[in-house]
Image (spheres, helix red, strand yellow):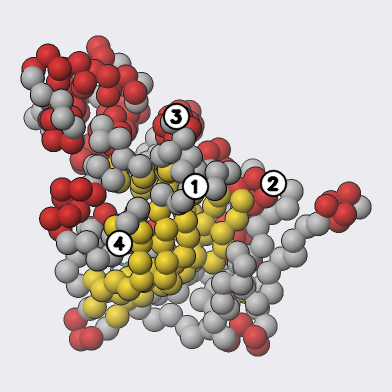
Amino acid sequence: MTERAPVLSVRGLSVRFLMPGGHRVAAVTDAHFDVAPGECLALIGESGCGKSVLASALLGLLPGNAQTAGRALLGDLDLLDADERTFARTVRGRLIGLVPQSPAAHLTPVRTIRAHLEETVAELTEVRGRTALREAAEAAAGRAAFPVTHLDRHPHELSGGLAQRAATALALVGDAPLLLADEPTTGLDRDLVDRTVDELRRHVDQGGSRALLMITHDLAAAERIADRVAVMYAGRIVELADAAAFFGAAGPRHPYSRGLLDALPDRAFAPIPGLPPELGALPEGCAFAARCDRASDACAALPPLRGTVACHHPHAVLTEAADRA
Ligand SMILES: Nc1ncnc2c1ncn2[C@@H]1O[C@H](COP(=O)(O)OP(=O)(O)O)[C@@H](O)[C@H]1O
Ligand code: SF4
Ligand SMILES: [Mg+2]
């Protein structure tokens, strides 16, 4: 892995929603992580754990009742301090290319993919003039393996896979250093999931200076392309791990991460008992305690993130000697 400065550096990022009656929802709490140039970090965790809220904080898309704390540095810019004008003019599309969850919802139904691409090229680049815009739009389509023969189609005339490629092409136009994909494979069959994430990986590998933060609850997709994994539970990142170790023989160290993998059909197929806690009513100690088979009295106190895992009784690190035994 390269030692260049991280593309994104998140430090103590928290998001609270202020609800009527003074109630507070702790959607994201004290997130710390970096994403390096050329790296893909997969942010995984069950639905409702705060992944999209974290993405919205990075994109300046939080609703008015949200309060943030901490820092999220993209180069010199702290995204948590930026105003809407900065997000609109310099962040969205230019510094962060968003690959959306439902491309169909991001594309305008009455406009062709060519029109979308030409407009985005005109907005985000210096390219001007009809012919040049047309060529740039076709090149952008090509980068995302979107067939030029389909450029004059409308969004509803595309398959799910092609709509996803159109959205990816749009996300790549601004040549942003950070690609942020929030559940980019929702609703796609396994074959298309593989092709979509392989495309994203390819864009990170090309040039080597781009980074990818991929939010997903699809662990197979994460395993396929991630260099590192961040596991989120009830708004907190509870484990940061090298993907090969996490999905390989060493396995995850946090009991929740183990539970996620054990729930997979091609593994133990044993779901984690119980449900995550409400983010508006979190326990004082470890939020996973009620579902954890390793819980002890110590877990009534919040486990700090020690090294790469936030747990009082994490699974042991497999040493090479233990591996050989
Ligand atoms: N505008 C909002 N107001 C209050 N709570 C919200 C709002 N948006 C999201 N939340 C809360 O934040 C939690 C995390 O949501 P989200 O980040 O969308 O989860 P996911 O990990 O599935 O992407 C949700 O459970 C919800 O309770
Ligand atoms: S801190 Fe305790 S309850 Fe929480 S995951 Fe670790 S062992 Fe389980
Ligand atoms: Mg989400």
Residue behind mark 1: 4
Which of marks 1 and 3 precedes in the sequence? 1
Residue behind mark 2: 248
As helix, strand or loop, the secondary structure at mark 4 comes to strand
* Image location of residue 187, percent across then percent down: 37, 39
Number of numbered labels in the structure image: 4
Q: Are marks 4 and 1 in contact (CB under 8 Å)?
A: no
Q: Are marks 4 and 3 in contact (CB under 8 Å)?
A: no
Which of marks 2 and 1 precedes in the sequence? 1
For the residues marked 3 and 1, what is the alpha-carbon distance in whole angstroms?
A: 16 Å
Which of the two residues, 97 or 225, is positioned nearer the viewer here?
Answer: 97
Q: Residue at x 65, y 77 (%)?
A: 312
The label number, if any, that marks residue 206 in the structure image: 3
Kind of residue at badge 4: Asp
Q: Residue at x 48, y 40 (%)?
A: 38
Around disc 4, counting alpha carbons within 10 Å, would you say few (fewer than 14), some (14 to 19), or many (20 or more)?
some
Q: Residue at x 58, y 86 (%)?
A: 300
Q: Nearer the viewer, mark 3 or mark 2?
A: 3
